[in-house]
Image (tube, rainbow, N blue to C red):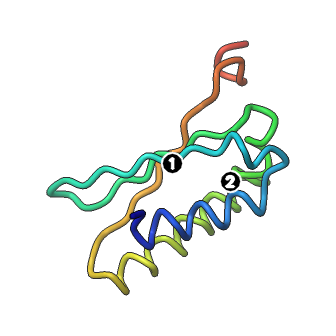
Amino acid sequence: MKEKDAEFLELVIKALVGNPETVQIERTVDEMGVLLTLSVHKDDMSQVIGKSGRTASAIRTLLRVVGMKNNSRVNLKINEPEGGIKDNA
């Protein structure tokens, strides 16, 4: 069973992107809290990041609120897809 934070992230991201079938979320827990690692299709990165990173920042803020409700610290890492901007630079 997925935890509430991963379920929430999956719901939000799949609503934003054009390729919801490619959304992958990996959840790891350590002494620092919960780390959610998000991978999306390279064409959907702009929707996830948003203008000046505002969408990603808003998602991280909402995840912190979900984490507080569940007494945990939640962080989000967004993986750069292959063929993305960093690979072309």
Residue 53: image tag: 2
Q: As drawn, is 68 to the left or to the right of 81?
A: left
Residue 89 in view here: no
Sequence-wise, the earlier of marks 1 and 2 is: 1
Q: As drawn, is 75 to the left or to the right of 84?
A: left
Report how far apart the C-alphas of labels 1 and 2 lie in the structure: 19 Å
Give the label, 1 or 2, closer to the camera. 1
Viewer-closest of 15 and 60: 15
Q: Name the image quarter holding residue 14.
A: bottom right
**Residue drawn at x 19%, y 53% as measured from the top left:** 30
Query: Could you tell me which secondary element the residue under label 1 belongs to?
Result: strand
Query: Which quadrant holds the N terminus?
Result: bottom left
Query: Which quadrant holds the C terminus?
Result: top right
Q: Which residue is mark 1?
A: 25
Residue 62 in view here: yes
Residue at the extreme right of the image, as rendered: 18
Residue at the extreme left of the image, as rendered: 31
Vertical relation: 28 (above or below) 54: above
**Residue drawn at x 69%, y 39% as measured from the top left:** 22
Residue at the extreme bottom of the image, as rendered: 69
Residue type, mark 1 in image:
Ile
Q: As drawn, is 33 to the left or to the right of 12?
A: left
* Position of residue 87 measured from the top left corner of the image (x, y, whole percent): 66, 15
Viewer-closest of 48 and 9: 9
Vertical relation: 54 (above or below) 27: below
* Position of residue 68 measured from the top left corner of the image (x, y, whole percent): 35, 82
Residue type, mark 2 in image:
Gly
Query: Could you tell me which secondary element the residue under label 2 belongs to?
Result: helix
